[in-house]
Amino acid sequence: MVNDQEQYASFFVRVWQEPREREEEQAELRGAIEHVQSGQKRYFKDSETLTTFINEVLQKWNVTGTERRYIA
């Protein structure tokens, strides 16, 4: 259960391009995401890993990334 002071989740996302070993290779993107409140961090090579991590954090609030909740 989330206390009343934790009504938001902040994420710090960094994305960078890995250096290529050979000129003909396609550049690869890498990234890291950190949940600011807990300090949990995950490295990723694709957007699926990124969104999975966000959804795992949001599940603690019984909210998924596919649901939309509006607060008036």
Image (tube, grey):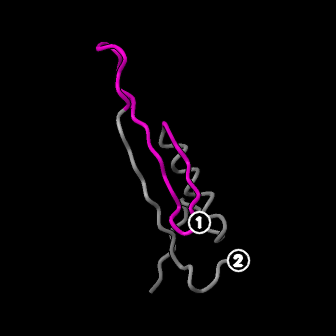
- Position above or below: 6 against 45: below
Is residue 48 toward the left or the right of residue 60 in the image?
Answer: left
* Dot 1 or dot 2, earlier in sequence: 2
Give the numbered dot on residue 68. Answer: none
- Position above or below: 2 against 9: below
- Mark 2 is surrounded, within 10 Å at the Cα level, by few (under 14), some (14 to 19) or many (20 or more) other residues, namely few
Q: Nearer the viewer, mark 1 or mark 2?
A: 1
Residue 71 at x, y = what percent? 47, 82
Tag 1, which secondary structure? Answer: loop
Residue 38 magenta-highlighted: yes
Is residue 46 toward the left or the right of residue 27 in the image?
Answer: right
Q: Mark 1 and mark 2: span between their CA atoms? A: 14 Å
Residue at image location 60% in from the left, 86% down from the top: 4
Check disc 2 and give the amino acid type.
Answer: Met
Q: Which residues are magenta?
A: 18-45
Residue 70 at x, y = what percent? 47, 78
Quadrant assignment, res 15:
top left
Residue 17 at x, y = what percent? 35, 34
Tag 2, which secondary structure? Answer: loop
Give the numbered dot on residue 38. Answer: 1
* Mark 2, residue position: 1
- Position above or below: 67 against 2: above
Check disc 1 and give the amino acid type.
Answer: Ser
